[in-house]
Amino acid sequence: MPILDRETTVYPENLLADLAERDTTRKWWAVYTKARQEKAFVRQLEGMDVPFYLPLIPKDNLIRGRRVRSHIPLFTGYVFLFGTDEERVKGLTTNRVSTVIDVKDPQQLVTDLRNIATLIESDARLTIESRLEPGDPVRIKTGSMAGLEGTVVHRRGKTRLLVAVNMLQQGVSIEIEDFQVEPI
């Protein structure tokens, strides 16, 4: 049983699908929030009608012998805001923001965020990766994640596909077999 209902992770729902490509009046920012303020920040953004993406992953905990599921931010402290300068300022007035980082390559960020969203939706067991190292770029050939692009890494003797948000130098990985991927 969840502690709380799952929060909104993307607003509006078509943000990563097509809105980010059609709307040229807005731009992307990576907002680094104050400690443990990500969900409260996106609640306020949604109330102000400001588009955002906050990747959340499920985490199971054992509390007093009961198993409870909560949803935690994939990238601790980061919310991806897609808005105008005025909407960015509205976000700053929430008093929940520590730093705002300008996105230099918005197309790459949208591609990375789409890949992350696909992995989260697949319910795959994710491992958070930090300080990424370059490897062989690959694409998954078959299955529910076909077309997903990432980098092959080796962790503890196992082959994993790393999907990264390059701007943050962080990402997630899933275990894969060599036959599932093809070089890009």
Image (tube, rainbow, N blue to C red):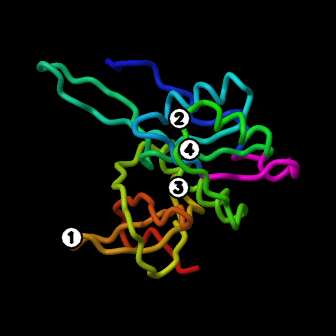
Q: Which residue is mark 1?
A: 156
Mark 4 neighbour class, 10 Å CA radius: few under 14, some 14 to 19, many 20 or more: many
Q: Which residue is mark 2?
A: 96
Which residue type carries mark 1? Arg
- Tag in front: 1 or 2: 2
Secondary element at tag 2: loop
Q: Which residue is mark 3?
A: 145
Whole-number angstrom distance, CA of label 3 to CA of label 2: 35 Å
Q: Look at the numbered discs 1 and 2 and tell me whether their residues touch, using CB distance below 8 Å.
A: no
Magenta-span inclusion, residue 29: yes
Using the image, determine if residue 184 lies above or below residue 10. below
Using the image, determine if residue 74 lies above or below residue 151. above
What is the quadrant of residue 147 in the picture? Answer: bottom right
Q: Which residue is mark 4?
A: 79
Looking at the image, tell me whether mark 3 or mark 2 is earlier in sequence order. 2
Whole-number angstrom distance, CA of label 3 to CA of label 1: 23 Å
Looking at the image, tell me whether mark 1 or mark 2 is earlier in sequence order. 2
Looking at the image, tell me whether mark 4 or mark 1 is earlier in sequence order. 4
Whole-number angstrom distance, CA of label 4 to CA of label 1: 30 Å
What's the magenta region?
16-30
